[in-house]
Image: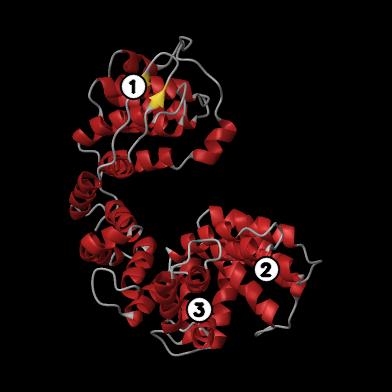
Amino acid sequence: MNGGNGGTMAKQSHWLAAFVPLFFCLALPGTAEEEPRQSDPLRQEALAGEVDSQLKLASEFFFGTETRPRNPVLAVYWYRKAAEQGSGEGAYNLGVCYEKGWGVDRSSLIRAFEWFDQAAKAGIPEAKLRLGLLLAAGVPDEHLEKEVLKGISADRVAAFRMLRELAQTGYLPAAREFGKLVLADRADRETSGKEARKLLQMAAETGDVESLLLLAVCYRDAIGGSGDQAKAVECWERAAGLGSSEAKVYLAAACEYGQGIKCDPDRAFALVKEAAAAADPRALLRLGDYYLNGDHVESSLPEALALYRRSYESGYLPAAVRLGRCAELGLGMTADPVRAAELYGIAARAGDPDAQYAFGRCHLKGIGMEPDPAGAVFWFKTATASGQLDAVRELGICLLTGNGVEKDTEEGSRLLEAAAASGDAEALVFLNNN
């Protein structure tokens, strides 16, 4: 597969779409009125309607040159001129500007969709990709001062077809995004997992790191075929060799527990240290665990907390659970149950199953808040939907006892038996004693 399909245009378009931080720092305010210049052949050619000149002028205004200051509004003006003459590249870049809110009055996914559609019909692969992703998620109505722009209903069937066809042309990002969409949805895993695995295998052959990581998930979780932990490890080895810190974290876990590879705790620790040195948030959390437990290093609560904080500040939700636990138990700090509940709640609302269980436990036991059994049941149910084993057990107990929920001994017993069968010792004890 070749991620470079689309020629020069594709390279320019990717460049534009990726140019967020520097653009916002340096873009200058402007208008669509441009002062005439004494000697500006490019502008004269653009004014005369030459599409290539319009595109080049737009690019210069977007990125800026020594002689032409950055001006996003003028960039949009010239992209629009080119698009109105049927330029797929102009339409694509105009769509990106509307999607990101660059040089336009307001961002608009609906306008972006319209321009991506025009660019897709002109054969621009990047536009087809973005169109497919917007179609998969759907676009809500947009309310303007004097009108309402009607949104686009989600159509995953059409989106998958678009991404599939694009991926089959050898366009690497389409295979990758198709895989992401499928792996993110349980139903899609069942219906399209086999196809996703096949496309990711093709993409991984090019050495694309993200495709290797997604393919490893397919092998690890038996998506689209049988599970194969050894093949998952092969993917992580390749991705780690290409510099992926995320792959090193997964590979470390495999080495630590001997899954698909010989058990090697020393190598696991070394891989975690390498990934943490690259500021990978998962590795920072895992290295914090090493310091907390005194494993391979001298025990240090301050070092563990510092690593957990760095991980949390990077946006990694499981780190909030670790920090919450330390606050709850007073590890390395004065016990602060209110702060513990706050941290659990932040991560729980953002979708972390372990945090949802912990937050439910706060509601159940009154940790940092007044006891609220019904609230506990809500969070246990939420975490159970993701298979969080502790939550399965606690929800079962609540149902058996009628605590915070209408008593249902049949469902409560079923949940406890499921938890016990999965190795939960507390569930087994509860069943034996009741």
Q: What residue is at 45 percent from the left and 34 percent from the top?
A: 100
Q: Nearer the viewer, residue 188 or 289?
A: 188
Give the Cα separation between the discs numbered 3 and 1. Answer: 50 Å
* Helix, strand or loop for disc 3: helix
Residue behind mark 1? 80
Provide the residue designation for mark 2: 325
Q: Which mark is residue 99?
A: none
The earlier-in-sequence mark between 2 and 3 is 3
Q: Amino acid at mark 1?
A: Arg
Asked whether the viewer can see residue 97, the reply is yes
Q: Secondary structure at mark 1?
A: helix
Q: Nearer the viewer, residue 254 or 403?
A: 403
Q: Quadrant of residue 221?
A: bottom left
Kind of residue at disc 2 = Arg
Location of residue 257 with respect to 141 vertically, above or below:
below
Mark 2 and mark 3: Cα distance apart in space: 24 Å
